[in-house]
Amino acid sequence: MNLNKSTLSEQIYQILRSDILTQRIPLGEKLTLKHLQERFEVSSTPIREALTRLSQDGLVDYYSNIGVNVISLSEEDLRELYQFMGDLDRLAILYTAAYPDHEAICRELQNAVSVTEKLQDCENMPEELTALWIKNSDDFHLIFYKYCSNRKLKTAAETLRSQLTIFSNIYETKQEPQKEIHRMHIKIFEAYKNKEFEKAGDLMKDHLNASLEFALKSFRDMNS
C-alpha cells in the first residue's frame, strides 16, 4: 500500500479507525504488529503511534505481553454507553444556552436536519448518500459540543462517541431507524429553537434511549 511517508502514522490511524468504525475489522479482533507491517509495508514505529491513538479513542485495548485487540462490548456496555452519552448530550445542550448567538446554532442545526430530510425518502439510497445522511445525523449532535464552551465535556464525549459510532454506522443505514432519528432531531431542534433548553435536553436523552434499541438489535444480529 502506497502511503505518504511524511504522515504515515496519521494515515494508518485514519485507515484503521475507519475499518473499526465500519466493522471491516470486527469487535474483539487481535491486531498484530507483524500483520499490520505487512499490510502497510512500513516499520513498527508509525503503526505503534497509530495504535496508541486508537487506544486513546477507546477503540482498541492494550494487553501487557499479549498485544492489541479491538474493543469488545457486551449488551450491558451498550446500555451504559448510550445512557451516559444521553447525559453528556443533554449537558451539551444546556451549556449552549449561554452561547450569545442563539441564531447561529439554530442555523447549523437547521442545516443538518434539512439534509437528512431531503435524503429521507430516497429508495435504495446509494452508499455515498447514506454516508452523507450519517454525517449530518452525527453533526446534529456535534453542533452542541461545538458551542458548549466546555473542553472537559467535549473530551469526555469524544471517546464514547467513537464507540457508539460502531453501531450507529450499522443501524443508520436502514430506513426505519433513519426516520425515527430524523423525527427526534426535529423535535429536539424545535424545542431548542424556542429556547426550551431543558425540554430539548430531555428529548435528547429520550432519543439516545430509542437509539439504544436499534444498537442492541444490531449487536444481536452481529452475534447471532
Image (cartoon, rainbow, N blue to C red):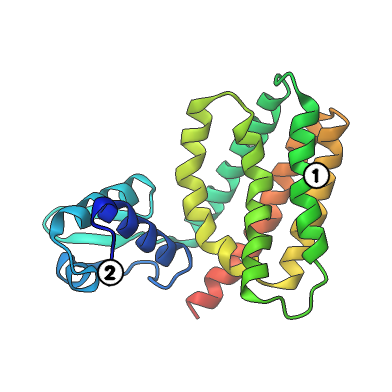
Q: Indicate whether 128 appears above or below 187.
A: below
**In the image, residue 196 lies at what x, y percent?**
84, 29
Which residue is identified by label 1?
110
* Label 1: how many Cα within 10 Å (few below 14, some 14–19, many 20+): some
Q: Residue at x 60, y 34 (%)?
A: 145
Relative to 132, 52 lies left or right? left
Mark 1 vs mark 2: give the one in front: 2
Is residue 51 visible to the viewer in this orientation of the structure? no
Q: Residue at x 59, y 61 (%)?
A: 168
The amino acid type, in three-letter code, at marker 1 is Gln
Q: Residue at x 15, y 61 (%)?
A: 66
Which quadrant: the N terminus?
bottom left
Relative to 30, 103 lies left or right? right
**In the image, residue 60 lies at what x, y percent?**
32, 56
> Circle 1 — which element?
helix
The amino acid type, in three-letter code, at marker 2 is Asn
**In the image, residue 45 lies at what x, y percent?**
15, 53
* Label 2: how many Cα within 10 Å (few below 14, some 14–19, many 20+): few
